[in-house]
Amino acid sequence: MKKNKQLPKLAACLMGAAALMLQGCADIKGPETEKLCGPWTSVEGKPDVLVYREGDSYKVTVFARSGKTRRLRPQTYLLVEEDGNLFINTGYRIDVAYNEAADVLTFSPGGDYVRKEVQP
């Protein structure tokens, strides 16, 4: 009998979690986000990043080296828009801003990135 009483509570919790997940994966609107796409390099010597579109979502891949062998270990994060502000969640929130006039991408914390020249 106790299982039957807990089932509606469990269903409500699962519905709430599903709604939160869908809200976090919402696509980012606007043509200005497309301008972020491409490879970026840090002006402060931090790992390079790549911003790209996958379906209706935008993602950021950070090309960091780790361990004794300094092996390349890319990490990919979903670029999320909330109240007009962009951020990625790496375990903590990193805000992302784009200065179109200077073509500079800023991660806060993380510093400034300039668009990387693509070699043919």
Image (spheres, rainbow, N blue to C red):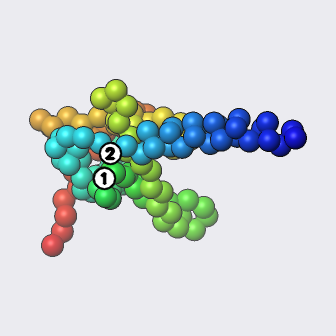
Q: Residue at x 24, y 56 (%)?
A: 38
Q: Quadrant of the C terminus?
A: bottom left
Question: Of the residues shown, which amino acid type is indicated by label 2?
Answer: Asp
Kind of residue indicated by mark 1: Asp
Q: Position of residue 16 (x, y in %)?
A: 57, 36
Where residue 34 appears, as percent x and y from the top left, is 20, 48
- Label 2, label 1: how far apart the Cα atoms are: 5 Å
Vertical placement of residue 8 versus 115, above or below: above
**What is the crowding at mark 1: few (fewer than 14 residues within 10 Å), some, or many (at least 20)?**
few
Q: Quadrant of residue 86?
A: top left
Q: Residue at x 29, y 42 (%)?
A: 28
Residue at screen point 31% across, 58% down: 55
Q: Which residue is mark 1?
A: 56
Q: In the rendered view, would you say 53 is above or below 69?
A: above
Q: How many marks?
A: 2
Quadrant of image for the N terminus: top right
98 or 117, nearer to the observer: 98
Mark sitting on residue 69: none
Tell me which corner region of the image, top left, top right, bottom left or bottom right, holds residue 24: top left
Q: Residue at x 40, y 55 (%)?
A: 61
View extreme (left): residue: 101
Figure quadrant of residue 82:
top left
Q: Nearer the viewer, residue 53 or 73?
A: 53
Q: Secondary structure at mark 1?
A: loop
Q: Secondary structure at mark 2?
A: loop
**Can residue 34 be seen here?**
yes
User: Badge 2 is on which residue?
Assistant: 27
- How many residues crowd mark 2 within 10 Å: few (<14), some (14–19), many (20+)? some
Q: Position of residue 76 (x, y in %)?
A: 45, 55
Do labels 2 and 1 touch, CB within 8 Å?
yes
First reached walking from the N terminus: tag 2 or tag 1: 2
